[in-house]
Amino acid sequence: MAALDRLLPLVHAELRRLAGRHMRHERVGHTLQASALVNEAYLRLIEIKQVEWQNRAHFFAMASRLMRRILVDAARAKGYQKRNAGGQKVSLDEAGAVAAAPFTDYVALDNALNALEAVDARKCKVVEMRFFAGMSLEETAEALHVSVGTIKGDWRLARAWLARELGDSPP
């Protein structure tokens, strides 16, 4: 925990960028702000016991996953369980292409990602790292200890699978 306390000031700007990326996918008027999302993620990070941080990418992937959980929990608490209840469909093409589009159905995306994780956990991690954390193919490959070619294939298949699950036409 002491190591995490020393690390946080050094990575705060990157965590804010990551939170901003998550918040861009949220509906307008969301009550949670990026700074609150960073703070809540920090509180959850310090609660995690006995994690051996492998590298920078592993830390930010975990922080991104926690931010996703926080936003999903907030959506569920607000009663957004109903799929397509005014939500905007977003195809999971390249992460940069969707960053500007607000994504309002975090519950449906979370359900789809949980289903993907049950089928192929690595593909789920690839989506989390690319879509939510904004990691490059190379950073994702390094974090998962596989080749860039493997990540390209996983990313392509995961996008198609999630597009089907979310009712979008495949990219």
Image (cartoon, grey):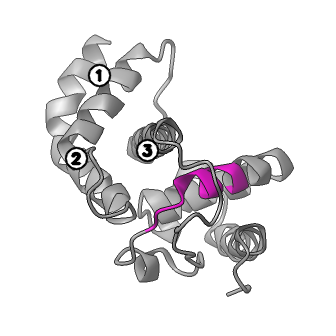
94, 107: nearer the viewer = 107
Does 60 sit left or right of 35 as displayed?
A: right
Amino acid found under the numbered disc labelled 1: Leu
Q: Which dot, 1 or 2, sits closer to the camera? A: 2
Q: Position of residue 153 (x, y in %)?
A: 73, 74
Inspect this view and state whether residue 145 appears.
no
Return the x and y of residue 14 as percentages of the image width and height.
23, 50
Q: Quadrant of residue 156?
A: bottom right
| Image quarter (top left, top right, bottom left or bottom right) of the C terminus | bottom right
SS assignment at label 3: helix
Horizontal side of residue 168 vs 12, given as left or right = right
Q: In this picture, is 47 found above or below 70?
A: above
The residue type indicated by label 2 comes to: Gln
What range of the chain is rendered magenta? 103-112
Q: Is residue 122 above or below residue 40?
A: below
Residue under circle 1? Answer: 4
Residue highlighted by disc 2: 33
Percent x, y of residue 94: 52, 80
Spatial CA distance of label 3 from label 1 is: 23 Å
The residue sitting at 51% across, 13% down in the picture is: 50
Q: Which residue is mark 3?
A: 71
112 lies above or below 72: below
